[in-house]
Amino acid sequence: MIEPSRTRDRQAPPDSRRVADPEEEDAAQYLTFSVDHETFAIGISGIKEIVAWSALTVVPMMPRWICGVLNLRGAAVPVVDLAFRFGRPVRPASKRTCIILVEVTNGDITQDVGLLVDAVQMVQEIPAGSIEETPPFGAKIKPEFIQSVGRVDGKFFIILDVGRVVASDALAPAATSPRAADGRG
């Protein structure tokens, strides 16, 4: 009779024999999403959850790029419309529109903030060697919003500095333009 434990010892599963790629060891995971047909990414470590689009409560006297607050289990969470924040046209909500809830720390204060995006794409592993400094040209958003640029399989992802994107003292030039009446806030 063959003992099951001996069979397991002799035959390792195929995945455990894989030779590690040194670049993959330092890979970090990023959530990629689209805003106005452009792909952006943020590190998954600060993401709390992703929720489906729902109507928001508009709050007077807020910066115009904050499209309202979301009632999340009894807590009011401000939601930043990334298209508006980046000076892009605000688009009507679709079936894929969603809100990425992130935790942002500013000094001693930690707050949950929602990021309104057109669609969430996927979690992408980006090796440390494929992350580059922000180029001085080509980005269609304020340079201070960009943490770095990731490159995977010939595709580039703008990795956002979420803290700077949601900082109230870094108002986007589009904040003085009128909001579109499209049901997004």
Image: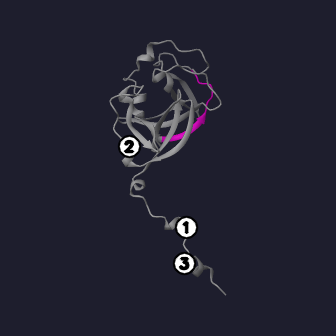
Q: Amino acid at mark 2?
A: Ile
Which residue: 41% across, 20% down? 172
- Asked whether residue 48 is drawn in magenta, I would say yes
Which mark, by number, is residue 14? Answer: 1
Residue nearest the observer in this picture, 88 or 105: 88
In the picture, measured across the screen, residue 36 lies left or right of residue 23, that is right
Residue nearest the observer in this picture, 37 or 89: 37
**Residue 62 image offset from top left, x and y in percent:** 47, 19
Q: Which residues are magenta?
A: 47-57
Which residue: 58% across, 81% down? 6
| Residue at the spot of label 3 | 9
On the question of residue 109 being in view, the answer is: no
Q: Residues within 10 Å of mark 1 (few under 14, many from 20)?
A: few
- Seen in the picture, residue 128 relative to 144 is either above or below; the reply is below
Q: Earlier in the sequence, mark 3 or mark 1?
A: 3
In the picture, measured across the screen, residue 118 lies left or right of residue 45, that is right
Q: How is the image coloured?
A: one colour
User: Label 3's element?
Assistant: helix
User: Label 1's element?
Assistant: helix
Considering every residue shown, the one lying at the far bottom of the view is 1
From mark 3 to mark 1, how far is it between C-alphas?
13 Å
| Residue at the spot of label 2 | 131
Contact between marks 2 and 1 (CB within 8 A): the answer is no
Q: Earlier in the sequence, mark 2 or mark 3?
A: 3
Q: Amino acid at mark 1?
A: Pro
- Seen in the picture, residue 62 relative to 104 is either above or below; the reply is above
